[in-house]
Image (cartoon, helix red, strand yellow):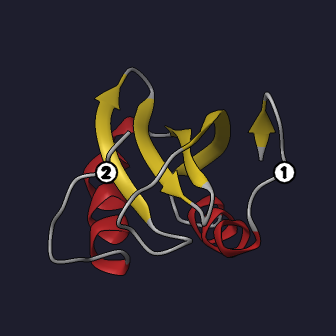
Amino acid sequence: MKGRHTSVDKHLKSNIHWVENMSGVEKVVLGFSESCRHKYPPGHIRFKADVDGGIKVNAYSGKGVTDVFIKIEPISKREEVKAKIAVRFQLSGGLSKC
């Protein structure tokens, strides 16, 4: 993990390491954390957007949400990474309040 900070909720830590070890993932960069209420279970990771060089996801903890950038190399593996995240963190829909 790289970024502004490397401390994350214990529920997120194992899931972030799971993402780091996926084929095609070169780096996971933690962004800003925001304290807010949400309806996702602690440790949940949800796709947010395609960006240059990878994808952005939201990582939910018991205290809020953290922006996470996942650098993918080669970029042709982007859809494969997104599919693995979607399967592992499948929920019955819903939006966060932040």
- Classed neighbour count for the residue bearing mark 2: other residues with Cα under 10 Å, few (<14), some (14–19), many (≥20): few
Measuring 26% from the left and 65% from the top, which residue is drawn there? 83
Counting from the top left corner in percent of width and height, residue 4 is at 79, 27
In this view, the mark in front (1 or 2): 2
Q: Please give the residue where the numbered disc 2 appears in the rendered image.
A: 96
Which of 43 and 35 lies nearest the eye of the viewer?
35
Q: Amino acid at mark 2?
A: Ser
6 displayed left or right of 19: right
- Classed neighbour count for the residue bearing mark 1: other residues with Cα under 10 Å, few (<14), some (14–19), many (≥20): few
Q: Residue 23's mark?
A: none
Residue 4, above or below 65: above
Measuring 67% from the left and 74% from the top, which residue is drawn there? 11
Q: Amino acid at mark 1?
A: Ser
- Mark earlier in primary sequence (1, 2): 1
20 displayed left or right of 72: right
Quarter of the image holding residue 17? bottom right
Q: Pick the quarter of the image with the C terminus.
A: top left
Determine contact: label 1, label 2, CB under 8 Å.
no
Residue 32, above or below 22: above
- Provide the secondary structure element on which disc 1 rests: loop
Q: Please give the residue where the numbered disc 1 appears in the rendered image.
A: 7
Counting from the top left corner in percent of width and height, residue 97 is at 32, 45
